[in-house]
Image (cartoon, rainbow, N blue to C red):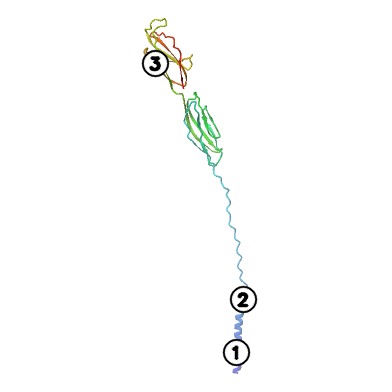
Amino acid sequence: MSIIAARTRALALSFMISLSLTACFDGDNKHAGAPPVVAAPAEPTTPPTTPPTTPPTSAPNQAPQISGTPLTSAKTNQSYAFQPTAIDPDGDKVTFSISNKPAWASFDTQTGKLAGTPSSSSTGKFSGITIVASDGKNNSQLGPFDITVASTAAAGSATLSWQPPTENADGSPLTNLAGYVIRYGTKSDALAQEVRIGNPGITTSMIEGLTPATWYFTVSAYTSTGVESAPSAVGSKTVT
């Protein structure tokens, strides 16, 4: 009985061990046979939104820059010229215009040059001259400025001298000499200007303020009663 019992315990133990092993084995199989874990598909990502492209804006047009210092004086019979400088920041072509242009001058609309030669009749002040530079869109101006034209005539002079008369036209002695009359002009037959000298002892005189030209002169004497002699021979002097 002891042997059988012993065997029976052994079998049971073996069986139990077998069951235990089998249970462990089955557990491993279950673990091994489990379906693999599959990662969830990544959610589709939304591509970044590209901000709308803003068309480039052009810079505003800039007006040309005009500069220069015009001469404000001129002389008759001498050339006058002034040309401003103009630069356009945008590189545009610049043209020019002028207001209150002197009649004796010309103006170049491509260069802005003001030039001319005032004549002897163009003396005076020419006011409010303005030069405008334009690129076709915007303008800028130089001025207004004035040009004063003066005469270039140099003040010449002529010195006259004469011998006082001692007798009348009839040959009688001259006793009431009172003075002299000097007449002069730029035409020998039209001596429109005169100087009276009320002292018979003066026999020389300087005539001043003569412009460039040939001037003609005569001298005549007059008495205290107002009787005037015939003029002397015509003398002349050229003032340059």
At 61% from the left edge and 83% from the top edge, which residue is drawn? 19
The amino acid pointed to by label 3 is Thr
Residue 199 lies, with reference to residue 144, above or below; the image says above
User: How far separated are the C-alphas under marks 1 and 2?
Assistant: 32 Å
Please tell me which of labels 3 and 2 falls first in the chain. Answer: 2
Q: Determine whether, in the image, residue 134 is placed left or right of residue 156.
A: right
At 62% from the left edge and 76% from the top edge, which residue is drawn? 32
Q: Determine whether, in the image, residue 155 is placed left or right of residue 63.
A: left
Mark 1, residue position? 10
Secondary element at image label 3? strand
User: How far separated are the C-alphas under marks 3 and 2?
Assistant: 152 Å
Q: Nearer the viewer, mark 3 or mark 1?
A: 3
The amino acid pointed to by label 2 is Ala
Q: Can you tell which mark lies on residue 204?
A: 3
Marks 1/2 in contact by CB < 8 Å: the verdict is: no
Residue 134 lies, with reference to residue 40, above or below; the image says above
Q: Nearer the viewer, residue 11 or 66?
A: 66
Q: Across the whole image, how many numbered discs are drawn on residues?
A: 3
The amino acid pointed to by label 1 is Ala
Secondary element at image label 1? helix
Q: Nearer the viewer, residue 113 or 129?
A: 113
Marks 3/1 in contact by CB < 8 Å: the verdict is: no
Q: Nearer the viewer, mark 3 or mark 2?
A: 3
State the image coordinates of residue 49 (x, y, percent, origin top left): 58, 55
Q: Nearer the viewer, residue 30 or 54?
A: 54
Please tell me which of labels 1 and 2 falls first in the chain. Answer: 1
Q: Nearer the viewer, residue 87 or 50?
A: 87
Mark 2, residue position? 32
Residues packed near mark 2 inside 10 Å, few (<14), some (14 to 19) or many (20 plus): few
Residue 85 in sight: yes
Please tell me which of labels 3 and 1 falls first in the chain. Answer: 1
State the image coordinates of residue 22 (x, y, percent, origin top left): 61, 82
